[in-house]
Structures are given as C-alpha cells and as structure tokens.
C-alpha cells in the first residue's frame, strides 16, 4: 500500500469580515481537496494563530449544500421551489428584468446591495462599478463601521494608530468593547505575550462576562451604553490625581482646560450610578491607566453599536491623550488601520462613471426601503429590482418584520449570488452560485493590523459556481452599461492596477512573491508625534460633529444634541415600564455574522438560540436554566432558551450570534428586535441598543 501523498501548502489570506485578516497556509491535496488551514507563522501579526472555524474550512468549502447551478424560482417566494437553469438563461433573464424595471421607474429603481461576506477588494467592491455604469441607486454602508470609525476619527482626525504589534510591548492592555477570543483572536496573542514577558495587566470592558474577560486581570461588566461615563470618570481621576500630562495636551490637544473644568463633576461616584460599576472598580482602573504610560487601548466595534456609540468611542480615545499615552511605544489608542493603505479603488469601482447626485439608500433600512417608507426611499422611486452579493439581509439586517415583508413582495425582482441557500437566497427569483475565496483571486487589507495580503485561486469551484467579478462584467455588458476599460479586466489585472496606481510600484508580482506587504507607518507617524490628523495637528476633545472627516452621507440622527465634550449622552433605547430590560446581540464564537451557521461543527458548538440573563432577574421572572423565554418589544417577539448566571448585570440580557430566523421557534430571529434608526452623526445600526420585555414561554 502506498502512503497517501502529503498535501502541498499554499499562502493565502482569510477573506472574512474580521479585523484579524489572518495570513494563512492552505493544505491542498493532489485530488484538489482542501485539508487543514494553518495560521502563517512568519507573519508577525498572525503569528501562527487562527480561529477554529477557519482552521476547519474544508468543511465549508466542500459542503454538500454548496450552490452549484443557477436557479429560477418556480413556486411562491420563499417556498424553496427552484429549477436549475443555465448561466446563459439566468443572465439573460436578469438583464431583461432589470431593463424592464429601469424602463418603468428609471435606473434608481435597481438597488445593487452588498456587504463584506468577502473582504476581497475586487470581489466585494466591483458591484459599485455596475452601479456607476448604470446609474443605479447607491448604497450607504451602515451595518458595521460607521459609528466606531466616526468616533475614533473625531479625536485623531485619521483612522490609524499605534502599531497593533506594540500591544506585546505594553504594560497594560485595555480591551474595550470587543470580544477578541471570539471576534479577532490575534489580539489575544499579543496581549498575552505582554503579560508573559512584561507582567502587563489585561483589562476587559464589556456588558457581560465574555471568554475574553475570563482571561483578564481586571474585568468590568457595565451597563450597555455607559462607556463614555466610565471614560469621563477615568479622565476625572487622571486630572484629579496628577496623572494628566498637561504639557502634552498643551502641544497636542484643542481644549484641555475646558475638558478639565467640564470633568470636575464627572467623578467616579457620578459614573458609578450610570455604569453600575462600583467606585472602587473605577478608581482601580483609573489608577492603573494613570500609572502605566505604556497602556495600549484596543477599542472595538461592540461598544459603538449604541445610539451614543460615537460619543463613547471618542471619549475612550480621549483618555490616551489626557494621560499622554500616545507618546510611548506600547501606548496609545488603536481602533483600525484603514487609513494607512491608500489603495486606489478608481478602476475597480469605475469612479469616473459615478454620479454623486444619485441617492444612497441606507442598507440598514432595507426593510423600510422595501416596504415603501418614503423617508427611507429618500422620496425617490420604489426599489423593484435588486442584485445581492456578499450579504444575507434576511438574517442580519435590523427590523426583520419589514425585511421579510419587503422581500416577499411579488413586484420585487431579486437576484441573489450566494455560496449557500441562505434565508435571503430563499426569497430570490434567481439564485446564482458563487465561488469561495480559495476558488478566485483577490487582495485583502487588514483593519486590525498593517498588512496587504494576496489570496490566489488555489482550487476549482464546484459545479458552475462563478466569482462576483464574472457576474458583474457579464451583466454590465448585457445591460448596456457605460463603457469603461475596467469591465474587461481580470481580478489579477485589477489587483495589479490598484497596487501600481497606489504607492506599491511592485504591483501584484511583488505582493504574490512576498505573500504580504507590511505597510506599517513609522513610530512618529503612527503615534502622531508630528501632530494628529487635523490640519492644525491637534487632537479634538471638542470635535465639530457635523464635520468629522469620516466616510459619511452628511449629518443625520439627532446630531445637534451631541455633547460638545466627552460626556454620558442619555439617548439610548432605555428601559421603560413596558420594556424594562436591555438586550445586546453580541457575536458568537463559532459563527461569523450569518456565516458558518450552515457548517455542522459550528452549529453543534453553538447549540441553540440562547439568551443569557442574571440569576436575580431569572428568579423574579420565574425562569430557570434552559427554559423557553420570549423577548419582545414594539418591533416583534423572539423565542430563545435561557442561560442563567452572573454574566451580565441585572437588567441586561445577551443573545449571542445571528441564528437564521428559521432556527428560532416561531420563525423570528434576533434582528426582529433590533432597530434601523439612524444614529448620530452619520448613521449606523445600534445592534446592541434594544429595550425589551421578557417572559417565560
Ligand atoms: N466569531 C465571530 N467573529 C466575528 C464576528 C462574529 O459574528 N463572530 N463578526 C465580525 C464582524 S462583522 C465584526 S464588525 C467584528 C466585530 O467585533 P467586535 O469589535 O468584537 O464587536 P462586536 O462583535 O459588535 O461586540 C464586541 C463586544 O461588545 C460588547 N458590547 C455590546 N454593547 C456594549 C457596550 O455598550 N459597552 C461595552 N463595553 N461593550 C459592549 C458585546 O457584548 C461584545 O462582547 O467581529 C468580526 N468577527
Ligand atoms: N443582531 C445583530 N445583527 C448584526 C450584527 C450584530 O452584532 N448583531 N452585526 C452586524 C455586522 S457588524 C455586520 S458586518 C453584518 C454582516 O452580515 P452579512 O453581511 O450577512 O455578513 P456575513 O454573514 O459575513 O456574509 C454574508 C454572506 O456573504 C456570502 N459570501 C461570502 N463570500 C462571497 C463571495 O465571494 N461572493 C458572494 N456572492 N457571496 C459571498 C456568504 O456566503 C454569506 O452568506 O451583520 C450585522 N448584523
Ligand atoms: S480570526 Fe478572523 S481573520 Fe483570522 S482566520 Fe478567523 S475569521 Fe479569519
Ligand atoms: Mo461587521
């Protein structure tokens, strides 16, 4: 008997919507099957570590339920009755229907809709080229980053910060509003290295005891939406006890004296009331931060998914300026490195064809848009045709009652290009089978680190699955989209153009040879030693909220009411008599948004839709471990099973993970309860800011 041949290993990058963007090595067997996936050891951010769900990716890649043929709906919407058709028939039908819709209502009736199911810049963003070539409706991207980015940029003027690898050189690491053990595992690698080599203290701030908090020296469980109060009290102590770096602020900040005066009343006692933390806990945190100049603040997305989330992010980032932490290696506040890459997207998206007068519909308000809400439609024509790639709105978008009603509309023609029969694909008129990342070429940039990475096509796709780029180029041609040289380019040509027309003259060949490009700016730039991102070089304690240089659609939400200086902003969906509890819909470890909820080992690990609550609340409600409970508010109700303990504070519940609606008894998923209200100042969905009633089923 001959020994099985050893699989070959190829370099790639994880394509998922995760700040870690891991450098990976993929085992490919002689028969074309993919084996284990490993974290790349010689990449010093990934450092050989990846999450379990991607290590066992072969399960998702070679899944028997992969879509392999174009499908046409034959039964009622959502019935799951489809017939197989050829690509030619599918593309023909889509273009006919889109042209028909356009003839009736104008081009803006077509709404190409996408998100970050793949973070590959070619396969993710090329859909905007179709949009631009046809003058279809724009899409305002509000699912994820708006509030976090706006809040961080408000202070620094720029979306970048101290080298994430410096976490390992810190004497304290404050992991704030993120759960990296689940959502970006590499943060833990570097934080734990700091503890091992420098005895660094790890602080975790969340609304419940997470897996990350289990590893912390100091774990603070506060009330949802109270982070700015905690930040203010910490700064109060820094000023009060002589830890504030006044010389630094004089040189680097806009209004230090005003801030100091304003914070005089924001004491630990004041913040204790708002956060539910004890005065001692707040004092302990402030002392640690004050005494430790090498404190690395790793600020996540989670605490910004609140109506006051922008203010919280900004307030947390201010601490590192009051304490002067930014000056030190291993110190400062980091959120995301988006601004360091400077990639030119003009070709992929055909910017020369873009018409900025065309409306940009808020993706989080897809339910309102599809049910004819005129404000959500920006007083324009109805949406009667959609092409959806890389996202699963009939699970992940807020206000599911409207989302489901909208997608069930008989006069809406929906095309979904997908890897699996998701809940969104089930509502489609035409379903197109999509490749996975190892089946196409793409380029990836790390939000949580400093690398550009290349992910080559390594294996053939199953059946007739095709990349996004193929579908878009075919449709642009059939729809008579405005001409552009980009329409004829391959993915590799796009990557090469993008690099050479940015600051990477070596193009794709250099990237491919090196596997990744380390784009880390030097210490001075990353630590803002030569000044912050605003023209005058000063950090803003007092930002002009309507003019923060963040990606935006113009000011919206109650932005005029935003506090001028860091403060607790009481604008959240607070408990009422009818809805006395608060809910956060935190991520689960084995799903990534709605991805992996099709993968048997992930489903097994997650069990069933569960709500975590405090034992005292459970006792008052007569609820015991494992009981079926109903969470409800004016948007609808959802059935889950109770997990009782001491993980959140009293009054707060946590539902981890986005299960399909259909995985819940009664068919309503967790986003039945979430809101699509636009938060201030530039929009964004407050997924963790929900009031609810709770009862035993
Ligand atoms: N396993 C897994 N990994 C993921 C994802 C996933 O769903 N599962 N999602 C991916 C995506 S798209 C993104 S954007 C990132 C996001 O990753 P993170 O930056 O980690 O953000 P969130 O996942 O929204 O939430 C993180 C934590 O914030 C907490 N939180 C909620 N409200 C508050 C609050 O008011 N204050 C504080 N202090 N904490 C609060 C939640 O309980 C949660 O534990 O993760 C990515 N990685
Ligand atoms: N309740 C609640 N809801 C949330 C959140 C929360 O914390 N709580 N988080 C929100 C956040 S931060 C985000 S980012 C969104 C994300 O939610 P989604 O945008 O739905 O993100 P994913 O589940 O990552 O990916 C969606 C789909 O993209 C498909 N896909 C992947 N690669 C490709 C490709 O190359 N081509 C095509 N055609 N399809 C592909 C996958 O198969 C998957 O079904 O969810 C938001 N919704
Ligand atoms: S940690 Fe994030 S980037 Fe790394 S392999 Fe897992 S999902 Fe991908
Ligand atoms: Mo996200």
Image (spheres, rainbow, N blue to C red):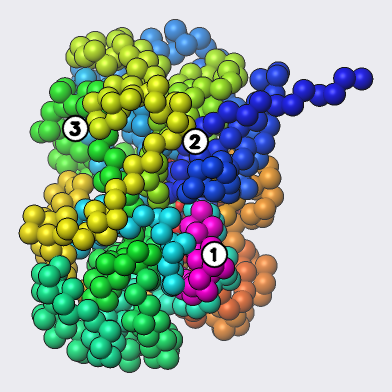
Determine whether 454 is above or below 83 in the image: below
Can you identify the residue that label 3 sits on? 381
Which numbered mark, 3 or 1, is in the foreground of this view? 1
**Span highlighted in magenta in the image:** 186-207
Residue at left offset 19%, top offset 43%: 374
Determine whether 344 is above or below 21 in the image: above
Closer to the N terminus: mark 3 or mark 1?
1
Can you identify the residue that label 2 sits on? 13
Q: Quadrant of residue 689?
A: bottom left
Residue at left offset 25%, top offset 88%: 242
Can you identify the residue that label 1 sits on? 192
SS at mark 3?
loop
Real-space Cα separation, disc 2 to disc 1, in angstroms: 24 Å
Closer to the N terminus: mark 3 or mark 2?
2
Instruction: Report if residue 230 is visible in the image.
Output: yes
339 vs 52, nearest the viewer: 339
SS at mark 1?
helix
Real-space Cα separation, disc 3 to disc 2, in angstroms: 40 Å
């Amino acid at each position: 008997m001959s020994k099985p041949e050893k699989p070959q290993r190829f370099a790639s990058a994880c394509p998922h919507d995760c700040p870690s963007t891991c450098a990976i090595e993929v085992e490919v067997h002689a028969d074309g099957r993919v084996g284990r996936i490993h974290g790349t050891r010689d990449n010093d951010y990934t450092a050989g570590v990846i999450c379990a769900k991607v290590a066992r990716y072969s399960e998702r890649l070679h899944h028997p339920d992969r879509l392999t043929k174009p499908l046409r709906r034959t039964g009622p919407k959502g019935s799951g009755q489809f017939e197989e058709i050829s690509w030619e028939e599918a593309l023909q039908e889509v273009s006919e229907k889109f042209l028909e819709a356009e003839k009736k209502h104008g081009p803006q009736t077509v709404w190409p809709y996408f998100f970050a199911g793949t973070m590959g810049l070619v396969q993710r963003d090329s859909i905007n080229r179709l949009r631009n070539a046809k003058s279809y409706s724009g899409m305002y991207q509000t699912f994820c980053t708006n509030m976090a980015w706006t809040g961080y940029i408000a202070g620094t003027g720029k979306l970048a910060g101290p080298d994430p690898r410096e976490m390992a050189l810190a004497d304290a690491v404050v992991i704030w509003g993120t759960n990296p053990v689940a959502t970006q595992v590499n943060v833990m690698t570097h934080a734990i290295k700091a503890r091992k080599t420098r005895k660094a203290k790890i602080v975790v701030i969340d609304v419940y005891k997470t897996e990350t908090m289990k590893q912390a020296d100091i774990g603070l469980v506060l009330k949802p939406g109270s982070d700015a109060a905690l930040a203010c009290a910490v700064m109060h102590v820094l000023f009060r006890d002589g830890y504030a770096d006044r010389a630094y602020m004089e040189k680097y900040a806009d209004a230090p004296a005003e801030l100091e005066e304003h914070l005089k009343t924001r004491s630990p006692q004041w913040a204790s009331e708002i956060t539910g933390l004890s005065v001692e806990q707040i004092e302990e945190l402030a002392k640690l931060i004050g005494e430790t100049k090498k404190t690395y603040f790793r600020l996540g997305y989670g605490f910004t998914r609140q109506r006051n989330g922008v203010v919280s992010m900004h307030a947390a980032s201010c601490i590192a300026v009051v304490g002067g932490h930014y000056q030190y290696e291993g110190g400062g506040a980091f959120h995301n490195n988006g601004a360091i890459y400077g990639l030119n997207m003009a070709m992929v998206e055909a910017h020369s064809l873009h018409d900025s007068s065309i409306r940009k519909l808020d993706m989080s308000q897809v339910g309102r848009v599809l049910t004819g809400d005129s404000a959500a439609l920006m007083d324009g024509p109805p949406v009667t045709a959609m092409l959806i790639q890389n996202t699963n709105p009939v699970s992940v978008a807020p206000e599911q009652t409207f989302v489901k009603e909208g997608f069930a509309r008989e006069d809406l023609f929906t095309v979904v290009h997908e890897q699996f029969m998701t809940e969104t694909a089930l509502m489609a008129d035409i379903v197109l089978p999509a490749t996975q990342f190892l089946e196409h070429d793409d380029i990836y940039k790390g939000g949580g680190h400093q690398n550009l990475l290349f992910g080559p096509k390594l294996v053939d796709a199953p059946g007739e699955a095709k990349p996004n780029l193929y579908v878009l180029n075919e449709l642009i041609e059939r729809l008579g989209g405005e001409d552009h040289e980009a329409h004829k380019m391959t993915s590799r040509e796009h990557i090469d153009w993008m690099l050479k027309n940015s600051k990477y003259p070596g193009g794709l060949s250099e990237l491919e040879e090196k596997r990744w490009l380390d784009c880390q700016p030097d210490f001075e730039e990353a630590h803002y030693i030569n000044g912050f991102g605003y023209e005058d070089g000063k950090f803003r304690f007092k930002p002009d909220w309507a003019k923060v240089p963040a990606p935006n659609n113009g000011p919206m939400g109650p932005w005029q009411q935003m506090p001028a200086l860091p403060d607790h902003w009481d604008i959240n969906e607070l408990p009422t008599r009818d809805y006395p509890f608060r809910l956060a819909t935190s991520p689960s470890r084995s799903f990534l948004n709605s991805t992996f909820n099709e993968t048997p080992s992930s489903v097994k690990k997650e069990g069933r839709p569960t709500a975590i609550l405090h034992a005292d609340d459970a006792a008052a409600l007569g609820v015991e471990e494992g009981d079926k409970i109903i969470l409800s508010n004016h948007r609808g109700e959802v059935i889950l099973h109770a997990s009782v303990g001491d993980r959140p504070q009293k009054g707060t519940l946590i539902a981890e993970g986005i299960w399909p609606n259909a995985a819940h008894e009664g068919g309503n998923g967790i986003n039945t309860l979430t809101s699509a209200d636009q938060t201030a100042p530039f929009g964004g969905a407050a997924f963790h800011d929900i009031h609810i009633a709770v009862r035993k089923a």
